[in-house]
Amino acid sequence: MAVLVGIDEAGFGPILGPLIASSCSFSLPDNLLKSDLWEILRKSISVTRKHLLGRLLVTDSKKAYSKSAGIKHLERTVLTMLKSMDRQPRTLAELIEILCPSSLERLNEYPWHKNMQECELSKDEADRKIASAALSNDLTSNGIALLDIRSCCLDVAYYNAMVEAVKNKANVLFTAIAQLIKNAYDSFADEELQIIIDHQGGRVRYRLSLQKMFPDMELKILKETPALSSYELQEGKKVMRLHFVVGADSKYMPVSLASMVSKYLRELLIGNMNQYFSGFDADLKPTAGYWQDGLRFINDIKTNIPHVHFDSNQLIRCR
């Protein structure tokens, strides 16, 4: 048996809201490592919205989320995947406790996140029960198991502190990804461990960053091209192979799922922020946090509700 891990992020570009990276880990027979998992699991998941027929949508989060559809596909897929592992969060606080518990204490320091225990998730338990049963049957019949879903949440103040320390936001993201890689290595390196990560900007070479993050491991470059950079890291008998792939979030199902997990958690946290400030001004237009509209939102807060004080370091990213 092998373990296949997909890693992707959401929120690298915005000026508001957290940067979140997530990993999704599956065990599967060795002969399925290079297979199309959408095709293998076609009875329970689909890469397109059309003709879902009760199946789960698993695709790049940019295709799963839209202003009109909102988070419904993200939420249905993520919560059903978690239910298949007997994890059933009812609130945002419980979701964070499952995905990234180390961030819970930091998030509780934000005025707009103090109600996370009251922020309820979808209550459509009947649909999730049916979808998770179909998923579990499909996984089992193909010798596949969903082992783990976890996230690394860089809330704004924490993100700002990290950027200030390293002076480079790309390195901050790579630190979060490296944490997820290390978690997978610690948990699954006794198996054949393959980790696929969505390409980081225009980078081709990752050797120096990997050696910095994993100084005690022997590193071998397997391939470095504009489309694919692959490495083998080994410590004693434990080995893992890392693959940085252009467009991985649309090519590999576990990466697509990680993309959806990251986007879902970020949208919930951005929703907390919007709800908090709209409580002072019902006419305040919400924001997704990207630069142009994020700057508009900041200006609206300062103009329309000047009496509401907030810590800029908790709200606005430095880069």
Image (cartoon, rainbow, N blue to C red):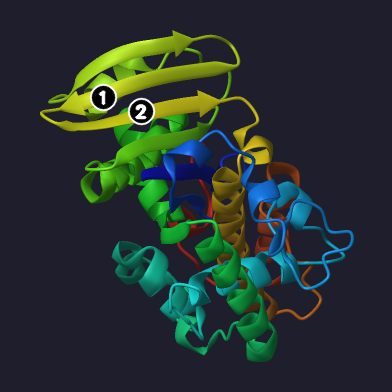
Residue 296 percent coordinates (x, y): 74, 52
Give the residue number, with chain letter if any, for mark 2: 241
Which three-letter amino acid code belongs to the residue tagged 1?
A: Leu
Look at the numbered discs 1 and 2 and tell me whether their residues touch, using CB distance below 8 Å: yes
Quarter assignment of residue 106: bottom left
Residue 233 is labelled as 1
Residue 16 percent coordinates (x, y): 59, 52
Nearer to me, 142 or 171: 142
Quarter assignment of residue 174: top left
Seen in the picture, residue 143 relative to 166 is either above or below; the reply is below
Residue 302 percent coordinates (x, y): 65, 62
Q: Circle 1 sits in a helix, a strand or a loop, which is it? A: strand
Seen in the picture, residue 98 relative to 225 is either above or below; the reply is below
Crowding near pointer 1: few (<14 within 10 Å), some, many (20+)? some
Residue 42 is labelled as none
Question: Measuring 50% from the left and 71% from the top, which residue is drawn there?
Answer: 82
Q: Would you say 221 lies left or right of 262 here?
A: left
Q: Circle 2 sits in a helix, a strand or a loop, which is it? A: strand
> Which quarter of the rendering shows the N terminus?
top left
Residue 189 visible? The answer is yes
Q: Would you say 30 lies left or right of 317 here?
A: left
Q: Would you say 123 lies left or right of 8 here?
A: right
* Upstream in sequence: badge 1 or badge 2: 1
Residue 139 percent coordinates (x, y): 54, 62
Quarter assignment of residue 286: bottom right
Residue 307 visible? The answer is no
Which three-letter amino acid code belongs to the residue tagged 2?
A: Arg
The count of marks equals 2
Crowding near pointer 2: few (<14 within 10 Å), some, many (20+)? many
Seen in the picture, residue 312 relative to 270 is either above or below; the reply is above
